[in-house]
Amino acid sequence: MKHESGRSMIEMLGVLAIMGVITGGAILLISSAMRTQKRNTVNEEVIQIVMGVRQLLGEYDDFSNINSSTIFSVMGMSSKNPYGGTYELSVDPANSRQFVVSVTGLADADCEYFATKAWADSVGYMNSDGKQSGATGMCNLGNGKNIVKITYGE
């Protein structure tokens, strides 16, 4: 009788299948962690922008002279966001005592997330006693083209 050693093809396929499942799970975890990191970065940067605008223009009665490029350069911050889009500042056309922070270049899911997120210091959130997010989103423009706008001020 011959006694053979080694692995059969079935055993090798089993090992490869198990490795494939483990790799797939790792990719999902890494993808989820990257999405969470991008969202946290946007949240922190929007807060930084709002604080910067309030520090720079807080002594004025309104924000009608807001200039995105000047404000970003004074704060030492880029207007680019982690999604490949930009942050934009503008005056609310209905009320010059309010300014709008726009986040552009969002994917559909991220746009919906930011549009429903509670932006605690925003006008919409404050006026609704915390019942609304305070943001508006145009989340049907297509991946990479969606925009969320958050209004701050009085």
Image (tube, grey):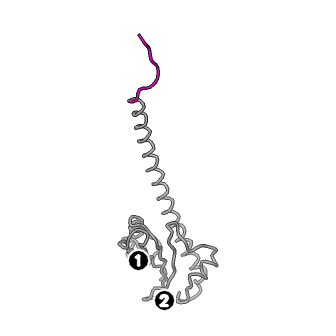
Q: Main secondary structure of the magenta part?
A: loop
Residue 120 point in image, percent of width and height = 46, 70
Let me know if residue 91 is in the magenta part: no
Q: Is residue 40 left or right of residue 142?
A: right
Furthest residue toward front: 2
**In the picture shown, does residue 46 fall above or below 69?**
above
Residue 102 point in image, percent of width and height = 47, 76
Q: Which residue was labeled with disc 2?
A: 96
Mark 1: secondary structure = helix
Residue at image location 59% in from the left, 76% down from the top: 52
Q: Which residue was labeled with disc 1?
A: 124
What are the residue bounds of the magenta stretch?
Answer: 1-9
Q: Amino acid at mark 1?
A: Gly
Mark 2: secondary structure = strand
**In the picture shown, does residue 66 fall above or below 20?**
below
**Quadrant location, the N terminus:** top left
Question: For this rendering, which residue is in front, 114 or 50?
Answer: 114
Residue at image location 60% in from the left, 77% down from the top: 72
Residue 67 point in image, percent of width and height = 56, 85
Q: Amino acid at mark 2?
A: Ser
**In the picture shown, does residue 96 fall above or below 137?**
below
Residue at image location 46% in from the left, 85% down from the top: 92
**Within 10 Å of the Cα at label 2, are there few (<14), some (14-19), or many (20+) other Cα atoms?**
some
Question: For this rendering, which residue is in front, 56 or 18?
Answer: 18
